Image (cartoon, helix red, strand yellow):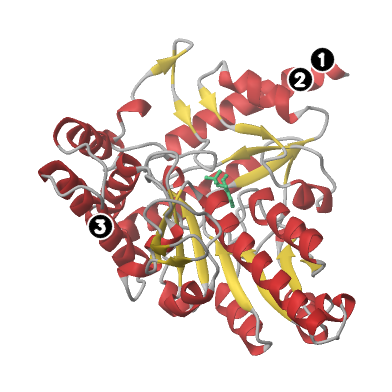
Amino acid sequence: MKENIWRKDFPILDQEIYGKPLVYLDNAATSQMPVQVMERLAEHYKTEHANIHRGIHYLSEKSTEAVEQARKTIKGFVKASEAEEIIFTQGTTDSIHLVAAGIAEELLREAAGAMEDNAGLAGAVSRAGIVTTQMEHHSNYVPWQQVCRQTGAQFFVCPAPDGELDLDALEEILKNNRIRLVACAHVSNLTGTVNPLDQIIPLAHRYGAEVLVDGAQGILHQPVNVQELDCEYYCFSGHKMTGPTGIGVLYGKRACLEKLPPVRFGGGMVDIVTEQKTTWGPVPHRFEAGTPNIAGIIGLGAAVEYLLEHDIEAMHAWEDDLMAYALEKIGALPYVRILGHPKKRAGAIAFAVDGAHPYDIASMIDKAGVAVRSGNHCAQPMLQALGESAAVRVSPAFYNTKEEVDTLCEVLEKVITMLRRFQS
Ligand code: PMP
């Protein structure tokens, strides 16, 4: 088998747990960090740690420069047209919340305006709707459900039978309602479904809706070009793309960011503050109130540099090969049912086993050194639609190998046999 040229950069993978070599296949929960990112973080703390944008001393300027350089690197990575379209957040959940809360304020203002015009609140709110999908992570589902609850807007869920979005159903929703926004994952964190954004986004636009893409699971496993996609928003997390935790990005088209009301107030985001009124600073700073996760931003910039310098296209090709291999091998194991049959899959394979609980499977294979995840994967609506309440999820990344998939399958087979014996 071919040698994995990136693996040596991930020291955490080179260890034994419970006396067995670690096989880390839980990258959809969090990916690992290359040594280059750790070194950049250490260098930052050792030589440039200071608050940004405020001081005029040497360290503050150095830190500010590093943060703004990271913004430019990330802009290049997702192919945004301007660095100002990159907003730093705490992660995907936080990015989605920023847009959701802004839209909630806009919908409430709209409803209040309609009341003044005598149209009545009911008339005002019934015109707006938000669509999410059955396959979303709770982070891209619950915020929209709550925005609708708070504003009276209608909440629609596009069905995803067998892990594939029903685009005819989506079109019906768009055609029959005034949809403000479609919120949709790039890649499902449960079934690994790669959604056809090249169809979904133009479809939403045809009916006047904006599109927010939850890219948490897409950013590492698929090429991303936000200008080509033409989405209004694209959200992602550092820790799922070989960067640190606690840092994420909201990409937004400048025109959308200019009209989105900021919802977090404080230092760094204002222009003029008086007793009666505050005016906002420019995009992106008006969305970055308070001291940001400076080290996190710099670490994320270093992660993106790593991906760019180490040929992300080759990483994707490696992963595709690994996913096809894993899907076939896991699917061939006795009593295993792969969940969802999407046309295109990346980064995650979920399955159930007849006669064995996912929690027992994941706990037992952990003792053999293999890290996977069990549970509802923050995707209860998708699991319910698939007729399950829990699943085992295997989620490889570019530094995993076919040998590791072989180890996983050997261990799985033994564990499934043992668990079924206990239960019979
Ligand atoms: N959406 C998807 C598809 C995810 O996989 C995740 C993380 N597992 C999230 C959203 C939430 O990301 P975070 O916890 O980093 O905010």
User: Looking at the image, which residue is at 49% across and 40% down?
Assistant: 27
User: Looking at the image, which residue is at 65% across and 80% down?
Assistant: 209
Q: In the image, what residue type sits under mark 3? A: Glu
Which residue in the protein does label 1 denote? 422
The N terminus - image quarter? top left
Q: Nearer the viewer, residue 18 or 289?
A: 289
Which residue in the protein does label 3 denote? 68
Q: Nearer the viewer, residue 241 or 274?
A: 274
Q: In the image, what residue type sits under mark 2? A: Leu
Whether label 1 touches label 2, CB < 8 Å: yes
Which residue in the protein does label 2 denote? 419
Left or right: where 272 falls relative to 93 = left
- The CA span between labels 2 and 3 is 53 Å
User: Looking at the image, which residue is at 45% across and 51% down?
Assistant: 266
Left or right: where 163 falls relative to 303 = right
The C terminus - image quarter? top right
Between discs 2 and 3, the one toward the N terminus: 3
Between discs 1 and 3, the one toward the N terminus: 3
Q: Where is residue 361 shown, x and y percent of the image?
A: 69, 25
Q: Is 243 rendered above or below residue 309? A: above
Q: Where is residue 18 shown, x and y percent of the image?
A: 49, 11
Q: Where is residue 167, by image quadrant?
A: bottom right
Q: Where is residue 277 shown, x and y percent of the image?
A: 50, 66
**Circle on res. 173:** none
- Whether residue 223 is visible to the viewer of this picture, yes or no, is yes
- The CA span between labels 1 and 2 is 5 Å
Q: Where is residue 82, by image quadrant?
A: bottom left
The local secondary structure at tag 2 comes to helix
The local secondary structure at tag 1 comes to helix
Q: Where is residue 2, by image quadrant?
A: top left
Would you call the spot at circle 1 few (<14 residues within 10 Å), some (14-19), or many (20 or more)?
few
